[in-house]
Amino acid sequence: MNKAALVQEMIAQLSEELEGYARSARSAHAEATDEQSKAENKYDTRGLEASYLARGQSRQAAETSEALEQFAALPLRDFGPADPIDLGALVELDTKAGTVSYFIGPRAGGMEVKQGRREVLVITPQSPLGQQLLGKKAGDRWETQLAGKRATCRIVSVA
């Protein structure tokens, strides 16, 4: 799997998200400041609700922008069989449920990226699984909780 192309796909997805959040924030801001949104009485909260929404969308846009910057600046290196898992690693795990691919990213945990038929889930070093993977190497096995069940995992590869 081409890790550089994978990261470019992550950057593209984050760029799309950022544009969506920015569009939504502009729309909510326009709604909040529109003449029609002025309160007609003390129980009319349309303008206030729109301003809360605009603030939340702006905060999401700022977080996505930070994630985008961190992915763009992420140094990509090749991991050898003896190298411990760290930020930027593409990890393939073998579990009872099958083989799963993870990318250890600086932000945007939970983002799914497809490359060909393969689906890769971004996890961060702060996530429970990310914490368990950091420092491990290809071939390592351990037991953990996955989806609320005890599971034995084996690291198939680290790239």
Image (spheres, rainbow, N blue to C red):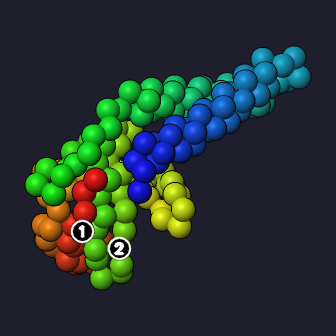
State whether residue 21 appears in this view.
no
Q: Residue 33: horizontal and vertical position, in percent?
A: 78, 17
Which secondary structure, mark 2? strand
Type of residue at label 2?
Answer: Thr
Q: Is residue 7 left or right of residue 53?
A: left
Q: Earlier in the sequence, mark 1 or mark 2?
A: 2
Whether residues under marks 1 and 2 lie with C-beta atoms below 8 angstroms apart, the answer is yes
Tell me the residue at 87%/17% (across/down). 35
Q: Is residue 58 left or right of residue 112?
A: right
State whether residue 95 appears in this view.
yes
Q: Residue 132: horizontal and vertical position, in percent?
A: 18, 57
Give the quadrant of residue 36: top right
Label drawn at residue 99: 2
Q: Is residue 28 left or right of residue 151?
A: right
In terms of depth relative to the viewer, which is nearer, 48 or 74?
74
Residue 151, relative to residue 75: is it above or below? below
The quarter of the rendered structure image containing the N terminus is bottom left
Q: Which residue lies most toward the right here? A: 36
Q: Is residue 131 left or right of residue 12?
A: left
Q: Residue 73: horizontal and vertical position, in percent?
A: 38, 27
